[in-house]
């Protein structure tokens, strides 16, 4: 049994799946099964013709097959790699990650980016496996074409046979070879892209783990009220800078106080403790505040060293 004769209809059908790489190709070639059957019928006819058991009928079908392979190669070259995706959706600024109130959202975005990198690598591996199988089938097709050319060279040189021989040798053979080269080239591109994706994911995951361990920046502006003896007054609180170097400014009833003595400002414990001044009359007052888990609210009390029983309630919301 020859190599060409061993080529099954299923193999040919799967080879023809080469040009069903996307919806456009599927719409362009609706008769894939017909093409596969035609190829197998042509193989059988060539053997019968060589054995003198067949008569010639008009019409060559190889032009269509060659055109199909050329179109498939062209479409494959123009297709985006299966590893590609819109990475702009995962843009995260350092400030967004550093700030306590935006860190969780930034982490979700970065985790999504890591998952997308992995999904892209999986898509690439699946396509590479498919292309490998198709490349192997094309090798079988090429071997079959070679055998058909040899068979047709040995039969009477009638016009129809000459035309079949010409189409096979000049059109089908080269177009199948070109499609195989295109597929193998795309496989190499995908393999390289997968390696890059894996390296980037490993690097990203390590950076995310390292960043999770860092203290977030307790920065922002909160606006609300301070309740003094049953009367509410407007209050604002603003923190700028970064851990170990924060600057805090607050205002009560429109009067701004700077040069504040910060005793604690911690993103991990979500605590803010400060006095109007480190020394002097202002040092007897202490603001002891807690930040909500979402970092969108600040609440607590102001106490007086000379009157520890007095607790002035503070309630602020992020602006």
Image (spheres, rainbow, N blue to C red):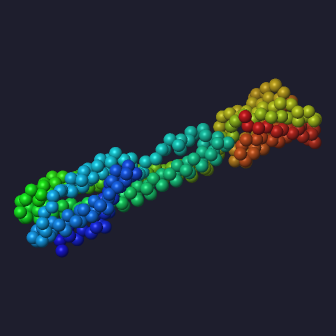
Left or right of 4 on screen, residue 15:
right
Q: Residue furthest left?
A: 156
Q: Nearer the viewer, residue 150 or 63?
A: 63
Picture quadrant of residue 297:
top right
Q: Estimate the x, y position of residue 296 in percent, counting from the top left.
A: 73, 41
Say which quadrant the C terminus sits in: top right
Q: Nearer the viewer, residue 221 or 143?
A: 143
Q: Residue at x 15, y 52 (%)?
A: 170
Say which quadrant the N terminus sits in: bottom left
Q: Is residue 252 above or below residue 131?
A: above
Picture quadrant of residue 100:
top right
Q: Nearer the viewer, residue 16 or 78?
A: 16
Q: Is residue 95 above or below residue 74?
A: above
Q: Residue at x 70, y 36 (%)?
A: 220
Q: Residue at x 56, y 41 (%)?
A: 92
Left or right of 228 on screen, residue 198:
left
Viewer can see residue 220: yes
Q: Estimate the x, y position of residue 237 in percent, counting from the top left.
A: 76, 33
């Amino acid at each position: 049994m020859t190599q060409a004769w061993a080529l099954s209809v299923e193999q040919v059908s799967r080879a023809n799946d080469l040009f069903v790489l996307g919806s456009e190709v599927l719409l362009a070639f609706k008769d894939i099964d017909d093409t596969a059957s035609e190829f197998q019928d042509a193989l059988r006819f060539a053997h019968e013709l060589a054995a003198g058991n067949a008569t010639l009928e008009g019409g060559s079908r190889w032009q269509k097959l060659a055109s199909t392979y050329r179109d498939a190669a062209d479409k494959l070259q123009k297709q985006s790699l299966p590893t590609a995706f819109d990475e702009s959706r995962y843009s995260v600024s350092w400030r967004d990650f550093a700030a306590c109130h935006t860190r969780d959202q930034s982490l979700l975005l970065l985790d999504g980016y890591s998952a997308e990198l992995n999904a892209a690598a999986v898509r690439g591996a699946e396509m590479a496996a498919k292309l490998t199988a198709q490349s192997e089938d094309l090798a079988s097709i090429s071997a079959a074409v070679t055998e058909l050319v040899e068979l047709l060279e040995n039969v009477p040189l009638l016009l129809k046979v000459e035309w079949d021989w010409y189409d096979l040798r000049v059109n089908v053979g080269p177009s199948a070879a070109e499609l195989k080269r295109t597929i193998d080239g795309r496989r190499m591109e995908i393999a390289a892209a997968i390696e890059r994706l894996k390296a980037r994911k490993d690097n990203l995951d390590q950076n995310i783990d390292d960043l999770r361990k860092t203290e977030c920046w307790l920065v922002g502006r909160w606006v609300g009220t301070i309740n003094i003896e049953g009367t509410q007054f407007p209050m604002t609180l603003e923190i700028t800078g970064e851990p170990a170097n924060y600057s805090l400014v607050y205002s009560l009833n429109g009067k701004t106080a700077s040069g504040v003595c910060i005793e604690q400002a911690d993103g991990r414990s979500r605590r803010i403790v400060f006095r109007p001044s480190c020394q002097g009359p202002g040092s007897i007052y202490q603001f002891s505040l807690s930040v909500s888990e979402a970092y969108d609210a600040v609440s607590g009390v102001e106490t007086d060293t000379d009157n520890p029983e007095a607790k002035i309630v503070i309630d602020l919301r992020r602006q």
